[in-house]
């Protein structure tokens, strides 16, 4: 049976000023085109990641924001703080999301904007969940989605994306269509633009391949990666022989290793 993704909450931002309000906050250029899904983040004024989310407009002047449920309340609080006296309605909705491997003939079915290999995100009201329950097209083979995510180095909230710690360019937001440098200002833009135009990234996420049979001990999240005897990074999400790792590019001198197994960065 297909299950509603209860790890996600859908928040509505509505009113005549909704587009301008969101456009000035988020990292991506928010399209006014109806029923087109975008991916973006909200940063701190210091340029650090706070929230990532998917967003689309089902009708004029209404935007639905698909955000991790564990931070939905904080996200609502943050939006309300920025709203000030604007006449906007911001509230959680009865919409839900189901992720599918293939397209589902639903009014709000979108390819994942980060990478087409991640399939589709389908949105509907809770009362319409029965439409999804019997569709085989919605099913992923066990761990298939996670393997695609890891092999394509797509960061996930709470694993590679850490609130008040992560910088989105180090997390590859340009590659996954999560930031625009032509849209104008957004919160944290100055720091983000400086990282893009005035520095070379010294740290960031990569996908690595390893021989898990050669590990000297069980692999765990946060396991240290070494190069030439120095710690240069950590393993984050992993599955089978692949992992997303956070590494210091300028510290990689020779081969990398973790728990006795050599690591190879995938192209």
Image (spheres, helix red, strand yellow):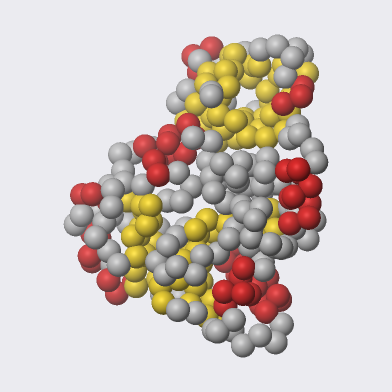
Closer-to-camera residue (41/181): 181
In the image, taking residue 201 as reference, residue 51 lies left or right, namely left
Residue 38: in sight, yes or no?
yes
Residue at 61 percent across and 70 percent down: it is 22
The percent position of residue 116, horizontal first and vertical second, equals 40, 44
The percent position of residue 67, horizontal first and vertical second, equals 53, 61
In the image, taking residue 83 as reference, residue 120 lies left or right, namely left
Residue at 54 percent across and 12 percent down: it is 214
The percent position of residue 12, horizontal first and vertical second, equals 50, 75
Residue farthest to the front, as pictured? 182
Number of residue marks: 0
Residue 36, compared with residue 145, is above or below; it is below
Residue at 70 percent across and 87 percent down: it is 85
Residue 228, compared with residue 104, is above or below; it is above
The percent position of residue 228, horizontal first and vertical second, equals 75, 12
Residue 184, compared with residue 212, is above or below; it is below
Residue at 31 percent across and 46 percent down: it is 101
């Amino acid at each position: 049976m297909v299950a509603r993704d209860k790890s996600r909450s859908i928040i509505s931002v509505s009113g005549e000023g909704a587009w301008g309000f969101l456009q000035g906050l988020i990292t991506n250029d928010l399209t006014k085109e109806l029923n087109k899904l975008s991916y973006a983040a909200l940063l701190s004024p210091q340029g650090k990641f706070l929230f990532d989310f998917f967003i689309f407009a089902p009708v004029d002047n209404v935007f639905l924001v698909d955000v991790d449920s564990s931070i939905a309340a904080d996200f609502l609080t943050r939006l309300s703080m920025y709203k000030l006296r604007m006449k906007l309605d911001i509230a959680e909705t009865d919409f839900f999301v189901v992720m599918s491997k293939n397209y589902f003939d639903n009014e709000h079915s979108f390819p994942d904007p980060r990478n087409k290999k991640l399939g589709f995100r389908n949105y509907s009201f809770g009362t319409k969940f029965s439409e999804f329950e019997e569709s085989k097209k919605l099913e992923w083979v066990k761990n298939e989605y996670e393997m695609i995510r890891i092999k394509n180095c797509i960061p996930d909230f709470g694993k590679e994306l850490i609130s008040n710690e992560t910088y989105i360019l180090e997390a590859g937001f340009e590659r996954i269509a999560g930031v625009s440098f032509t849209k104008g200002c957004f919160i944290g833009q100055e720091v983000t633009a400086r990282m893009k135009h005035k520095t070379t990234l010294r740290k960031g996420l990569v996908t690595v391949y390893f021989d898990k049979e050669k590990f000297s001990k069980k692999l765990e999240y946060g396991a240290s990666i070494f190069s030439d005897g120095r710690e240069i990074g950590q393993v984050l999400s992993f599955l089978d022989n692949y992992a997303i790792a956070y590494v210091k590019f300028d510290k990689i001198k020779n081969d990398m290793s973790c728990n006795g197994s050599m690591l190879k960065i995938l192209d």
